[in-house]
Image: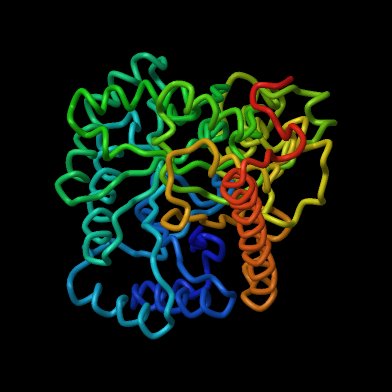
Amino acid sequence: MKLSILTAALQELTPRERRDADPDVAIEEWLEFARQIGSPNIELSAALHPTQSDVPSAALLDPVANTLDLRQPFNDERAARVRGAMQATRVGLSDLAYFDNMLAADESVRSKKHELMLRVFDAAVLLGTDAVTGFVGRNFRLGMDANLAMFEEVFVPLLRQAKARGLTFRVEQCPMPGWTITDTWHNNIAYAPGPWIALHRICERHGVGDQFRIHYDPSHAILMGQDSRSVFQYLKDTGYNFLIGGFHVKGQVIDSRGIAAWGYGGQTMQRGDWHADTPSIDPVEQQNAWKKQTVFCEHELPGTARHDPLAYLQNRSVDWLDHQLAARELLSIEPEKTFLVVEHEYPKARVQDKARLAPILAGSLAFTRAIDEAAAAMYALQHEVLAGQGIPAQGVGREPYRS
């Protein structure tokens, strides 16, 4: 598959005072950094500028990156400059990414986010990529069925805009449990295959089914007790194995002690984001809402977690080899045209020091490349070479739905 890396891996590669004055220098320097660490492509991250965001940076578990600064619309001149940097570094572009709540309850806040998303769409066209990745989100004030209706009302028009530009919108499935200081867990309604199918059926009714795809991230499956093979098998069984169009390569390591204490619902009380019956107004304390997730798990940068076969079988860590095999065996993808985007959210290694981070990211990219090459070789040997000679593969292998 085609390797890429999300530029949020190093938010401050270019210091804010330099890139605020000259926004596209941040992209140029990230392209050069990608070349140095061995990534042939980047997933270019956009976000509301810190001065415009409705969420204080102190309240974010992982600060977002506006490597692509769209305070001013992207234009032909800016695009030519970025394409020149891509040509000089020989680093390509997998897609553009803007992760935000497109179903925000406040109409003025939502309008600001939608406006930026349309600017991301326009930038994608000018830079020659055919996909944008992001979230659907959730209106926290509404139940889930009401959010489906809201999706039809306010998100489908975004997909129409994507269709008009020849783009696909790939939805990442993180449930975003810490996105709100309430105790709701599913704060992005596109969190699993059942919701994906419900949303896609709405899209089909409005002629934008081809614009709605999933950017699958196995870390979120582990977060919810799932495994990739079963997820992919379910999609195949229901006739929706075409929905996954790309991958984030990020792991999750479940802490059995945290599960023993709180279960998969995470910490529900005494987090520090509330005082008695009043929610905290301090952004630093609001970040404690993420204890719903972090109390029992921690993100893995691919390759940083120890090899743990028992954890793979218990769905407590990503079985990377089987993940890549299952994608080839069960999904309707063309591997040589499909992107694997490394996403870095391992807290202990989220250093904002280029010299220290470079070998970490280079090692993870090398791991991701090697695992995918091994899966490709294994798939070809079993499904093409042996099968072509009528020789069965050995053993049973990992099975979907097995408990």
Viewer-closest of 392 and 182: 392
Could you tell whether 297 is left or right of 15 in the image? right
Q: Give residue 296's position: percent from left, percent from top.
A: 74, 33
Snapshot quadrant of residue 355: bottom right
Residue toward you, 63 or 369: 369
Nearest the viewer among 191 and 180 is: 191
Residue 111 picture quarter: top left
Count of marks placed on residues: 0
What residue do we see at 68% from left, 28% from top?
Answer: 399
Look at the image and name its color scheme. rainbow
- Residue at the front extreme of this rendering: 389
Above or below, 10 relative to 298:
below
Q: Report which quarter residue 169 is drawn in.
A: top left
Query: Measured along the vertical axis of the image, is residue 254 above or below residue 139?
Result: below
Question: Above or below — where is 313 with respect to 141?
Answer: below
> Which of the image's four quarters has the C terminus?
top right
Residue furthest to the left in view is 164
Q: Measured from the top left, where is residue 196 in percent x and y?
A: 41, 27
Residue 373, percent from left and from top: 62, 60
Residue lying at 71% horizontally and 33% vertically, measured from the top left: 398
Give the residue at x 23% y 32%.
Answer: 156
The vertical placement of 240 against 148, above or below, is: below
Q: Who's the residue at 71% across and 21% down the image?
A: 402
Tell me residue 281's x, y (percent): 53, 36
